[in-house]
Amino acid sequence: MKGIINRHNGAYYGYDAEGERALKLTQTLYASPLITINDEGYTKHYQNPIHSDEPIFYYHSDHLGSASFLTDNNGNETQQLVYLPFGEDWVDLKYNTQQLETPYKFNGKEKDLESGYNYYGARYYYDWLSIWLSVDPLSDKYPHLTSYNYCANNPVMLVDPDGREIVDAQGRTMYKNGKWTEYATSDAKRIGNAMMQTKTGTEQFNKLIDTKAKIQLQISKEAYITIDDEGNTHYRFGEMNPTNATVDIKGNVNLKEANIIIYEGTIKQYLEDYDPDDIISRFNYKYGRIFDIDKIIGAIGAHEAEHTTFENLKTTYFENKGLVPEGTKEIEPNKKGKQVIKELENN
């Protein structure tokens, strides 16, 4: 969108080489990612220890990143915000008209006063109609959804952040805008491509892309197999290890970094142990008519991706505390893996 004009005001928008909005005339200038200048002054998105007399405001966000309260440096509430499910303003109370009125509202994104549109970086969102104003650049990956819908029509639990990427251990982007980058490892490509062979696998892969956490993807040649006291063999096909996360008193987990490992050695041993002539072996086989290692990797990837979701992380926390039955955290991941196998069988 280049600009907008109506009976009350107007604005022209300028973008940088990467498509990020860098200029808004006549209202706002983005001098840097940390400084915004407009006709009422300027806002710095950081604290300046040199000029300690400058007013400071703190954002208090909900699980979607939406600003719910603003407080000043003394902890006094200056603004309260409540939204309808798709982000439309419902309550906007200002307790001191002289204080800052934030434009960063639903999902923490800037809402333009002149248009009422929310700027997400890649697209503009119109909360009043609950739609994007342009086509999803990855719409071909969601043929079952309209390319203008917001968060698969589940805005209470899901967020559509700016950017779609997976990073490596150094934080370098491996996958963005539907393509692997030069930093993509062979393991990441193999897991991602295997997941994207099915609709459910693609949806799970996009969860890894859309999360704010840094997700590393790794394939291990190790066979992770144990035998319990009763002689039963247990195969570990993969695991999701949170390497950096915080938890609040309500059990809400903020995942910052994680490592997904798929044990190819376990898969190979499992296939070797399978006996098609043995009825018990056939009954216990987890992957239906699928015997291709890469396809099984896709199913395991879909399973492990579910463990990175906000809902499953919270369930895992409750299970570790003994607040829900053992195995609860595996219910949804198992469903995703089985659905991938079903779709592969029907291909």
Image: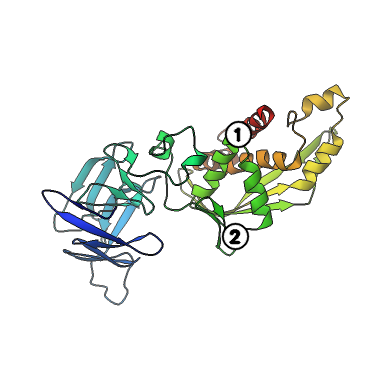
Give the spatial CA distance, label 2 vs label 1: 25 Å
In the figure, 323 relative to 183: above or below? Answer: above
List x then y, in percent, for residue 38. 20, 64
Q: Residue reaching furthest left?
A: 7
Q: Nearer the viewer, residue 235 or 172?
A: 172
Q: Residue reaching furthest right?
A: 277
The quadrant in which residue 275 appears is top right
Say which mark, if any, is on residue 168: 2
Q: Nearer the viewer, residue 257 or 163?
A: 163
List x then y, in percent, for residue 314. 52, 41
Indicate the amino acid at tag 1: Lys
213 with respect to 97 (left or right): right
Q: Residues within 10 Å of mark 1 (few under 14, many from 20)?
A: many
178 with respect to 133 (left or right): right
193 with respect to 59 (left or right): right
Q: Residues within 10 Å of mark 2 (few under 14, many from 20)?
A: some
- Count of picture labels: 2
Res. 326 visible in picture: no
What residue lies at 77% left-to-right and 39% top-to-bottom? 235
Res. 197 visible in picture: yes
- Between discs 2 and 1, the one toward the N terminus: 2
State the SS at label 1.
Answer: helix
Say which mark, if any, is on residue 88: none
Residue, disc 1: 336
